[in-house]
Amino acid sequence: MTGGSRGFPSDVRVAWAPRTDGMPRRDAAADLLGGLLPGAVVVRRCARCGSTAHGRPLVVGGRHVVSVSYTDRWVVAAVAPSSSASTIGVDAEDDDGRIDLARVLPAPSDLHAWTRVEATLKADGRGLALDPAAVTVEEVPGGFLSQVERTVYHGWDAPAPPGVVASLVLRQA
Ligand SMILES: CC(C)(COP(=O)(O)OP(=O)(O)OC[C@H]1O[C@@H](n2cnc3c(N)ncnc32)[C@H](O)[C@@H]1OP(=O)(O)O)[C@@H](O)C(=O)NCCC(=O)NCCS
């Protein structure tokens, strides 16, 4: 993986909203995506089985790429124009020690190591159907580069609410 210093891209938008008690999480995501992309229709499609009940979120019409993630109390959505990113992944986790990092990652790690990997798996579109060990991550000035097979992604640790850790990954168009 090679790459120089890169700041957070100006055409990528990341929005957070607190989850309301009793509100289905997808409704919370729909509200957030509706604010970021007014009028857009977002569907899901599973790369594995073709189901539209689960899987990667896709914007009908293809002019933007989107990703969403949930913690117990927050929903986050990331959006980029397809002209600058062919795929995007965002992952957020509560920093409460509930994830057994030693079980999911090969080397001693912190929670950002996991959100970087999971954001990459979401940008890839296969999610956890792919072994997290297939993702390599290298820190670079301003962010990180991650790689799955021959595909390289640009990544950043995203600002997040207190007690939450998040990373964003995209593949440049
Ligand atoms: C994607 C995945 C890594 C998310 O894990 P998580 O930390 O539990 O969940 P998060 O809150 O961060 O993200 C959930 C969102 O990820 C998105 N997502 C789900 N599958 C995805 C995929 N394959 N690629 C990219 N994004 C995906 C969805 O938008 C989902 O929210 P939604 O259900 O409201 O649409 C994990 O659920 C996964 O790998 N799922 C797919 C497993 C699979 O392939 N199963 C086969 C079914 S046939």
Image (cartoon, grey):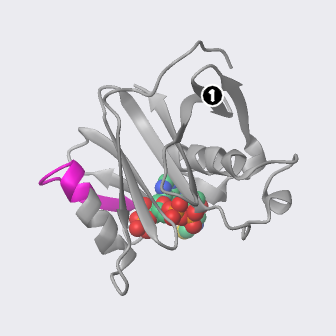
Q: Is residue 65 above or below residue 102?
A: above
| Depth order, front residue of 7/46 | 7
What residue is at 87 percent from the left and 46 percent from the top?
107
Residue with the most extreme top position: 4
Q: Is residue 159 visible?
A: yes
What residue is at 70 percent from the left and 53 percent from the top?
111
Locate the C terminus by quadrant: top left
The segment highlighted magenta reads 33-47
What residue is at 54 percent from the left and 53 percent from the top?
91
- Where residue 76 appears, as percent x and y from the top left, is 41, 57
Left or right: where 7 falls relative to 104: left
Left or right: where 113 falls relative to 7: right
Where residue 80 sits, quadrant-wise, is top left
Q: How many marks?
A: 1
- Where residue 13 appears, as percent x and y from the top left, is 33, 40
Locate the N terminus by quadrant: top right
Q: Give the SS element for disc 1.
A: strand
Where residue 151 sits, quadrant-wise, is top right
Q: What residue is disc 1 on?
A: 145
Q: Amino acid at mark 1?
A: Leu
Q: Is residue 46 visible?
A: no
Left or right: where 172 falls relative to 157: left
Residue with the most extreme bottom position: 22
10 Å crowding of disc 1: few (<14), some (14-19), many (20+): many
| Depth order, front residue of 144/135 | 144
- Where residue 168 appears, as percent x and y from the top left, is 51, 42
Q: Is residue 1 above or below residue 86?
A: above
Where residue 20 sits, quadrant-wise, is bottom left
- Where residue 54 appears, as percent x and y from the top left, is 43, 68
Q: Residue 141 colored magenta?
A: no
